[in-house]
Image (spheres, helix red, strand yellow):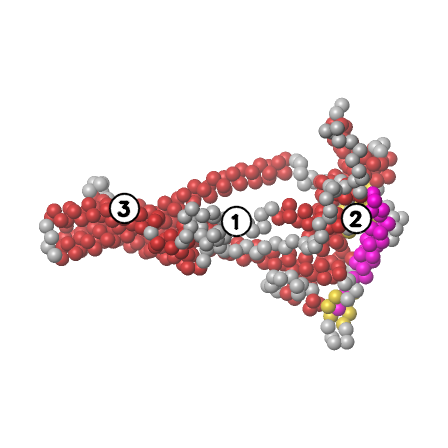
Amino acid sequence: MTARVQEQRAYRKLVSALRQKHGRATVADLSSETALPLETVRELVNTAADEFSGRLEVTGSGEILYSFPRGFTSRYRGLGVSLRRAGRTCAGALRTAGTWLFKVWIMVMLIGYFTLFAALTLLTVFISISASRNRSSDRDRGGVHLDLSIITLLMRMWFYSGLVEGPYRSGYRGRAYQRGSRVSGGKKPVYQAVFSFVFGDGDPNAGWTEREKKAVIAYIQAHRGVITLGEFMTLTGKNPSDAQRDISAYCVEFSGSPEVSAEGTLVFRFDRLLLRNSAVPSGFSPPRRALRTFSSNPKKANALFALVNGINLAFGSYFLFKSLTVGMLYTTAQAAAHGLYGVTFTFLGQMAANPLPLIGAGLGMAPVAFSLFFWLIPCLRALYNKKENKKIQFENFRKEGYRLIWENPLLVRERDIGSGSGVGSGDSERDRDRVIKELGSYSGVDVSVDERGETCYTFTELKREKEAAEEYRASIDPQNAELGGTVFDSDG
């Protein structure tokens, strides 16, 4: 029997014992129930606490009591979890494929229709001038030939001229490009600028979980491998419930273990994180989430895209309206009376016996629908960014509030909470109350009013936790974290 199979059997036995104990047990309880060694139980019970969102309590005798108030619904296994995971995977793949197809479609529609409408307008102007000068029919046929030349000319203008390249690609050719930023004076190509307007520039907090873990690990290593739940909350800005759940995951992932100090304070030790060959980095500061931005384009660029789309919408609406009200044209006089619509009808009539569906659907409904969709996505994205930024603002606000309280838990003035967050909060008074209540539910809080009439808060239990953590760290021999000299080298 492999070690992996043995571990899985032991874990199932432990979970079964927890169920029999109604989700409340100490390591000694579980060891006597399962006949597993104490060290095995200590290791596996942390895994169970992570999987089933368990809580850790310290008894009057200084023992750690594991409780599972949410029952034994797994966060990582089961049919529901598998279906949600598969759904997220499929949704992500479909979203990626759909996004790229949609990007291609956007460029074709935006550029193609703008060019086509411009060409038809110039063709109409040319025919109007020709008619006013009583040009010959040969010259009129030459107008159709000129139309094709105009289309080619406009396509070249769109892709290569300063009309579009000027705002984005001045000095760009042959230079490196980095997403959303200028490099060596160059700017992003036009297609990326369009995508930035419609889809934005991605999540500025991508990889946030990894960054946060690195910050927590660096803090643990700088503090002799010990961290308290209060410190973890200060670093991550998580509320007590989420912090309790996540610290259990850290214990599983980084071989940590909960311990109780001599004062009865719960601490978490990560001895293995101290066994490093390089020095612990200094100048630590917890990271903050960045606000989502609408686009990295200059405002003039976004205004240009909106203008081009507005032109497409105007032309599409015109052709849709004309196709519904004018319909078929049978004579040259009728065509001449309707200007652009008549010229387009005559021109498409050389390609199809009935050009009306081409005009109504192809030049009317399609560009109108696309133009509305082209504006709808940025509008919805702007609303989503606004909602997400409120969450990010509060997370940064809460993290700064926790830090302030942790640094001076015996004297916290209401006006100081969150004052250094660097990000304005939509409702500072409401957010302050929320921070106080969350931290107060964890450690208790006393409210008073000073001589100036300002509301002050005192977190006595948090002060005790801070002092107990420092005493516990002081009792750890730093030599235990030293690697020592090399006693074996595989190269001899």
Say which element carries label 3. Answer: helix
Labels 2 and 1: the sequence-earlier one: 1
Q: Which mark is residue 202?
A: 1
Horizontal and vertical percent for residue 9?
76, 29
Q: What stretch is highlighted in magenta?
A: 456-480
Q: Which mark is residue 224?
A: 2
Q: Specify the amino acid type for callout 1.
A: Gly
Within the image, what quadrant is residue 397 found in?
bottom right
Q: Specify the amino acid type for callout 3.
A: Thr
Residue sitting at the far front: 492
Q: Which of 161 and 491 is in front in this view?
A: 491
What is the distance, in whole Å, between disc 2 and disc 1 at their CAs? Answer: 38 Å
Horizontal and vertical percent for residue 123?
22, 51
Say which element carries label 2. Answer: loop
What is the distance, in whole Å, between disc 3 and disc 2 at their CAs? Answer: 70 Å
Specify the quadrant that holds the C terminus: top right
Name the residue located 19 percent from the left edge and 45 percent from the top edge.
145
488 within the magenta span? no
Q: Nearer the viewer, residue 68 or 166?
A: 166
